[in-house]
Image: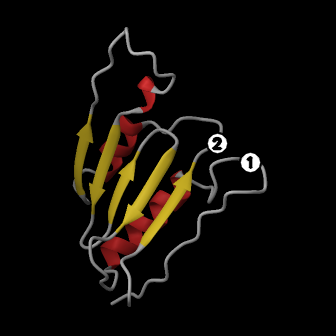
Amino acid sequence: MSEPYHHVRFRWWNRADLEKIAEEFTGKYNVDMTHHPKDTMDPSLLKDQRDELIVTADTLMGHLSIFRAVLSQKKPEKFTAKDVELRRRVREIYSHDRSTPFPWMYSSETKYEVQ
């Protein structure tokens, strides 16, 4: 393994329920919800999309937002069974490998090994 694992997944039409996902993952993984302040004067169109759920298995970490999930490792290591299960479940919840239903902008998945 020459590089850490990295992969981005997306939801297109409906938002992920981060509270529900946190409930599902709590007890299996380390779970931390990050709520970003929402100012009514903030001109950003995406201000309601800033909250993030950080889920950590053994070597794999997921940063989950309402439409996007980023799976990554800090250093290249073989996946444990817990990592494989987190990857599998995140791929079910975020079922697309590109940010749009149009046929461009694919996200490639880094190769990984399992212990």
**Residue name at image x 27 percent, y 71 percent:** 74
- The quarter holding residue 37 reads top left
Which residue is situated farthest in the top direction here? 41
Identify the disc placed on residue 12.
2
> Hey, which quadrant is residue 5 in on the image?
bottom left
Q: Residues within 10 Å of mark 2 (few under 14, many from 20)?
A: some
| Position of 40 relative to 11 (above/below) | above
Q: Residue at x 40, y 69 (%)?
A: 85
Circle 2 SS class:
loop
Q: Distance between the Cα atoms at labels 2 and 1?
A: 7 Å
Horizontal side of 32 relative to 6 (left or right) equals: left
Label 2–label 1 contact, CB within 8 A = yes
Residue 106 falls left or right of residue 3: right
Question: Are there few (<14), some (14-19), or many (20+) residues within 10 Å of tag 1?
Answer: few
Depth check, front residue: 89 or 51: 51
Q: Residue at the spot x=46%, y=52% of the render?
A: 69
State the residue in front, 6 or 62. 6
Disc 1: which residue: 101
- Where is residue 57 shown, x and y percent of the image? 27, 66
Q: Is residue 107 left or right of residue 1?
A: right
Q: Answer above or below: position of 66 versus 98.
A: above
Q: Amino acid at mark 2?
A: Trp
Above or below 81: residue 63:
above
Image-based side of 27 in relation to 8, left or right: left
- Dot 2 or dot 1, earlier in sequence: 2
How are the colours assigned in the image?
Answer: secondary structure
Q: For the point 44% across and 83% down, which residue is it? A: 112
Residue type highlighted by circle 1: Pro
Give x and y (percent) for residue 75. Answer: 27, 77
